Image (spheres, rainbow, N blue to C red):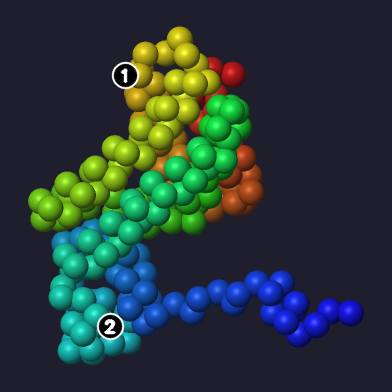
Amino acid sequence: MTTVDQRRRTTPPAPRRRSRRDEILGIAVGLFASRGYHGVSMDDIGSAAGVTGPALYHHFAGKEAMLVAALIPVSESLLRGGRERVARHPDDAEAALADLIDFHVDFALANPAVIALHLHELDRLPEDPRRQIRKLQRLYVEEWVGVLSRVRPELPAPEARVLAHAAFGLMNSTPFLGGEVDRVCRAALLRDATIHALTGH
């Protein structure tokens, strides 16, 4: 017989409810991605979020702060997730590479607006957060380079790095993909194209 305590231990925790700040940030990211950073005002964001000016500034000092809040946690999450997936397969480089590809494709399909911000708006940031994001990105790339060098030991690290960046170009194409193909098929196509680009088969 299952006790109450056992049920408490086995029941997964409820998903965290998005805070009002998270909701506003998501709206801002969508507007920045669709209109461009300079094409969006704080009033536009407040109007879309149903928030008055003073309430909006309670959460963010301005558009620049929103951009920082959108991009730095994403870069941190990618690095953390990439390292976790590599660590799952210490003795199987091909499995590690497949896991990395699955991880990034899932991210890219779920976050096309954030990818668009990375591609087009990163240079809007002040030097310090921009350097922090660039460093996180470099560390994430090196996770891929390390795995790819194990899969293809004949490749010098600089060449593996070129292929890793090419793979990101494929996977990060999601902001430009229409809805003609369903998500499952898009994920499969992106995975297949990426593994072929990296391994040649």
| Amino acid at dot 2 | Ser
Of 30 and 138, the residue lying toward us = 138
Determine which of the numbered discs, if any, sits on residue 47 in the image.
Answer: 2
Mark whose residue sits in front, 1 or 2: 1
Above-or-below relation of 156 to 172: above
Query: What residue is at 24 percent from the left and 43 percent from the top?
Result: 135
Query: What residue is at 75 percent from the left and 77 percent from the top?
Result: 6
* Residue 179, x across and y down, in percent: 54, 53
| Amino acid at dot 1 | Pro
Does residue 47 appear in the picture of this structure?
Answer: yes
For marks 1 and 2 on the same chain, the one whose residue lies earlier in the sequence: 2
Query: What residue is at 53 percent from the left and 49 percent from the top?
Result: 106
Q: In this view, does 105 lie to the left or right of 3?
A: left
Q: Judging from the image, what secondary structure is the residue with disc 1 in?
A: helix
Determine which of the numbered discs, if any, sits on residue 158 in the image.
Answer: 1
Does residue 191 appear in the picture of this structure?
Answer: no
Determine which of the numbered discs, if any, sits on residue 74 in the image.
Answer: none
Question: What is the number of callouts on the image?
Answer: 2
Above-or-below relation of 185 to 32: above
